Image (spheres, rainbow, N blue to C red):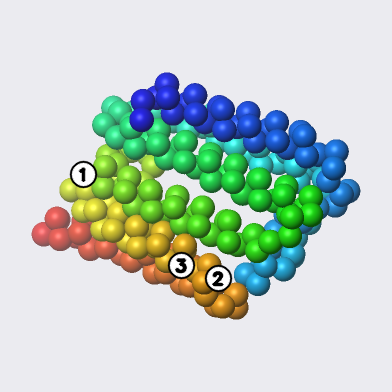
Amino acid sequence: MSSRTAYTATWLILAATGIGSIIAYPYLPPVIATHWNAAGQVNGTTGAFWGAFMLPLVMLALILVFTAIPHIDPLRANIEQFRKQYNGFLALFMLVLAAIQAAILAWNLGALFNISAVILPAVGILMFYVGVMLPQTKRNWFMGIRTPWTISSDLVWHKTHELGGTLFKIFGVVIVLAVFAPPQYAIWIIVAPLAVIVVGLFAYSYVLFREQEV
């Protein structure tokens, strides 16, 4: 995806999310649900204004940050080598956040449903895309699996991201399938694999670096 197409898409998604929030705001109750537990029960609320506009503001901030990164990273030439995947990630990330915002607004306007059935597949698709993107990612200071050892070696970076790509694609599928798990187990089905992936990739990059030194 070209930079122009990606950033046009992200701004359009943000505009649609903002307009939808503005339209919904007068009809929201004074206090709205913004967080649900694994069983789909509300366990977090906030005022209507912040509930309606916090996520669009976060999206705006993220777009600005992601726009700046390719210009400020000391290894920005490397980012250009996977710029299409980078742009695609930004557009998909904004789409996922827009879907979450739409689900929150719809639920608080009376369309009661299992909100996890919206959020989990959306996040799962995003994680799967991360898995697709990681093997294409070149060494940089902002994106990817950044450990002291991947940052220090192109070879360690490449091998760690190859493995990370496979693991995150599997993780994305697991998150989607967690929709069908009993609510009390769904959170552990997500948290446990993520912890294993993070710790495992950290250790793997260290081992690769030590092997390279020998």
Mark 1, secondary structure of its residue: helix
Q: Nearer the N terminus, badge 3 or badge 1?
A: 1
**Amino acid type, label 1:** Asp
Which label is found at residue 187?
Answer: 2
Q: Is residue 10 left or right of residue 41?
A: left
Residue 177: give its label. 3
Q: Is residue 16 above or below residue 92?
A: above
What separation in Å lies between label 1 and label 2 (alpha carbons)?
35 Å
Residue under label 1, please give it.
Answer: 154
Look at the image and tell me whether residue 147 can be seen.
no
If you read the primary sequence from the N terminus, does the residue marked by circle 2 or circle 3 appear first? 3
**Residue at the spot 46% in from the left edge and 67% down from the top edge:** 177
Instruction: Residue at 76%, 46% (x, y): give it.
Output: 51
Q: At 85% across and 42% down in the image, what residue appears?
A: 27
* Residue nearest the viewer, comparing 170 with 58: 170
The outermost residue toward the left is 214
Q: Is residue 148 left or right of residue 191?
A: left
- Residue 28 in percent (x, y) is at 83, 46
